Image (cartoon, rainbow, N blue to C red):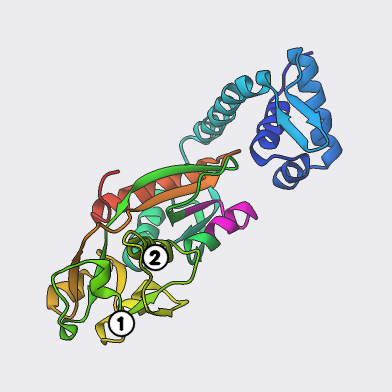
Amino acid sequence: MRVTFAQLEAFVCVARLGTVHEASRHLNLAQPTISLRLRDLERAVGTALFDRNGRGLQLSQDGSAMLEHASRIIAEMGKLKGWAGSGKVSGLVRLGVSETFAFIGLAALLRLVAVTYPDLRVELGIGPSPQLIEDIHQHRLDLAIVINPVEDPRLRIMPLGIQPSTWAAAPALGLPQTVRPADLLHQTVLINPSPSPNYRQTMAWFGSSGLEPMQVSVCNTVPSVIAHLVEAGIGIGILPTKLIEPQLASGRLVALNARPAIEKAHLCAVCHAVDREATVDAMLEATRQILREFDMLEPV
């Protein structure tokens, strides 16, 4: 019995997503079809690829060894499909981006895609990183540009760089140039809700000194709105440095040197761990180009 691409696809999908049910949803196939392909693959290779018990499917030792090879075959097949199309990338890609990237680089990205990949259609989702990652899990997005994603075997996470952040305040507050958690303890801190990266950054910075801010104003809004509130003197906040460059240059905001340093914000591209398409690769390459052109990131 020979090994088929369909069998490998089912195997990789179940291994990454954890269950036959999730794999069937992802591949839009019936669960019995997925199970049959797994059994046929195990017969073809002559070994059990999963340990089957009451808790579900767990990769066997042989299955773990085979996963890397099978994943590579799936990826190469995706490249082959792109090559067979004479280098033209066409179809639909559903892209999700964080608010900061949307504010700074999204228009330039869409212009670049329109010129470089005229047959590629883009559907957009803009929101906080946790929501974008959930949209990837639920197959509402194909690719997301997010901050500090948590490792997950169901996802492929590709680091893009570090998004610099700074404590920002209105000059009228008269805060010292270098600040420690105790210096900001009684200031009103504007913060995105948990579990956002901004929330984790802020609370971790105060927590490094065993403190919590006394006055917190949770703002379920985009960073540009928080920047406007900070500029108006409503409070202070940790903001992406690139986002507030105009306000810093004009003196409407001041950047405070934080001691200790603020936790790094890693900007990453996230997609499904299985069946990565040529459309995703094209959008990812275009995104990298825009990030370089706008000098948005520091190297990892």
Give how far across and how far down residue 119 sits, in percent: 49, 51
Please indicate whether residue 231 sits to the left or right of residue 138 in the image. left
Q: Quadrant of the C terminus?
A: top left
Q: Quadrant of the N terminus?
A: top right
> Callout 2: few (<14), some (14-19), or many (20+) C-alpha neighbours within 10 Å?
some
Which is nearer the eye, 50 or 31? 50
Q: Is residue 129 above or below residue 41?
A: below
Residue under label 1: 235
Give how far across and how far down residue 24 sits, in percent: 76, 43
Please indicate whether residue 175 sits to the left or right of residue 275 in the image. left
Res. 45 image quadrant:
top right
Residue under label 2: 203
Which is nearer the eye, 117 or 22? 22
Does 143 lie within the magenta span?
A: yes
Please indicate whether residue 222 sits to the left or right of residue 208 in the image. right
Q: Are marks 1 and 2 in contact (CB under 8 Å)?
A: no
Q: Secondary structure at mark 2?
A: helix
Q: Which is more foreground, mark 1 or mark 2? A: 2
Q: What residue is rendered at 13% in x and 78% in y?
A: 251
Q: Earlier in the sequence, mark 1 or mark 2?
A: 2
> From mark 1 to mark 2, how far is it between C-alphas?
16 Å
Q: Is residue 220 above or below residue 138?
A: below
Q: Which residue is at the far front? A: 210
Res. 22 image quadrant:
top right
In this picture, which residue range is highlighted in magenta? 132-144
Amino acid on which the number 1 mark rests in the picture = Gly
Q: Is residue 23 above or below residue 249?
A: above
Give how far across and how far down residue 259 sits, in percent: 21, 60
Amino acid on which the number 2 mark rests in the picture = Met
Q: What residue is rendered at 50% in x and 31% in y?
A: 83
Give how far across and how far down residue 63 sits, in percent: 67, 22
Res. 186 image quadrant:
bottom left
